[in-house]
Amino acid sequence: MKKYDAIVVGAGISGLLTALVLSKSDGGKDVLVIEKENHIGGVCRSYNVDGYTVDTGPHIITRLKDGPLKKLMIKYLDTPPVFKPHGKYYVKINGSTKEFPWTVADWIQFNVLPLRDRISLIRALFSALGTSMVAPKKITKVSVYDHIKNYDLSDSTLNFVNTIAHFLTGASMHEVSVFRIFGWSDTKNMQKKVSSLVNFLFREGAGDQAYPMGGIKSIVDSIVRSFPEGRVDIKKSFEVKKILIEGDSIKGVSDGKNEYYSDTVIYSGFVSELPKMLGDDIPAEYANKLNNVTNILSLTVWLGLKKKYFKNVGSEILVGDSNGAGAWAIPITNYDQSLAPPGRQLVGFGFMIDDADIESVKKRAMEFICRHWPSIENDIEMVHYQVLVPEKSVNRINQVIPSHRTPVRGLYLVGTDTSKASMGITRASYSVVECLKTLKEDGKIQSDVPM
């Protein structure tokens, strides 16, 4: 059996990007990508439903100006995807639709919430920023709700804050820390904290966000087209059951029948599933740490509409009520009409799932949509539901984020459960850059890593 320079387990966006970089590093490494499904891309796919091209969940790519995905694309993609600017975010609340209030000036004029509440939340924000400067570790343990609960905010404002917490982090205001909701990933980066404050005071957000023409799969297609000829093998429908170890070093992987060998394995699956593949070959303490990594489920409702309900290029944050966290709506045909039949509109509505009864969640989601657009039922010609894991770890207080380096020599981790920064594809890209840095530190690659 051929021995590879590296084996990447999992053909999601993290695994594919890692394979791309390795295949173009040090003159070109021979890489095997192993995927248990019969398709690649993970939650970075697009596929056809009744003439509509739906993505796996609603996506907008963030930090495209100077973030990790942009740096990886510039250095490694032969033909990067074409992106259309996201446009504005809108907030639908209390029967009104307003532009998202990015700055203090916008927030003061955000009159769908009581003025007293808006002023109180500004006070709460600056209180959190002040604490982060002098006692950053303290505020990492304080939830958003615990920080604002004594400000006597109205139910409408609390629902707004809870929806935004879910939107920014994937967790509720009761679970996510004040520190994390600002997008900070560590307690020491003073420059990033000051930058966050400047942005809040003066700068409108979403200026470096975009949607890829052709659907989210266009990113995966660009990666695969950029693989050097003969350098990357992709094996689908192969579920790794055992990670092979010899002494204290990695040897390869096995599905119980077939084995593939390398002294470098990068695992991009769920880290919580890794202990069962390693058995007694890793310390119990490390296995318990990985077992405690928790993820979230989301429901996406795709609607194919006979007419255009969303006029603006941009997306809408639908504020929930006391019974739910709201939703995020993206009319992707406002970016690329080819994703739907002529004259039709395709919209994805993203909901977080907090109920084991998925059918009840679907019913409540449709009721929620119809409350916001009472006439929409008459114009629906396609409904498609997706239950997905959008983030492999949630940004909750005390969430475990394992290192990219494992106790097994030559075994590394990559993916959205190995990075604290951002969310979605951007978070996956951060994890790839961080993992590559670790590989270089260990002498696995010599080429420069985009930082």
Image (cartoon, helix red, strand yellow):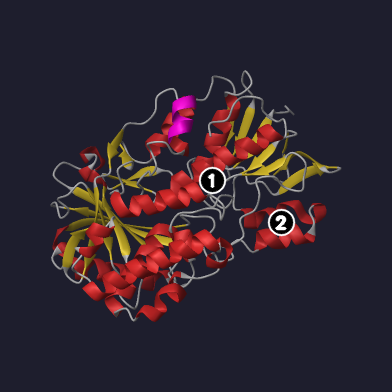
Nearest to the observer: residue 366 or residue 323: 323
Q: What is the quadrant of residue 286 in the picture? A: bottom right
Magenta residue check for 74: yes
Q: Tell me, yes or no, whether the two marked residues, 1 and 2, touch with CB atoms within 8 Å.
A: no
Which stretch appears magenta?
A: 70-75
Left or right of 342, for residue 77:
right
Image quadrant assignment for residue 106: bottom left
**Which sits earlier in the primary sequence, circle 1 or circle 2?**
1
Q: Which residue is mark 1?
A: 37
Expressed as whole percent of the image width and height from the top left, the position of residue 9 reads 62, 42
Q: Residue at x 75, y 34 (%)?
A: 263
Q: Which mark is residue 276?
A: 2
* Helix, strand or loop status at disc 2: helix
Residue type indicated by callout 2: Lys
Name the chief secondary structure element in magenta: helix
In the figure, is residue 231 to the left or right of 221?
Answer: right
Q: Position of residue 366 (x, y in %)?
A: 27, 67
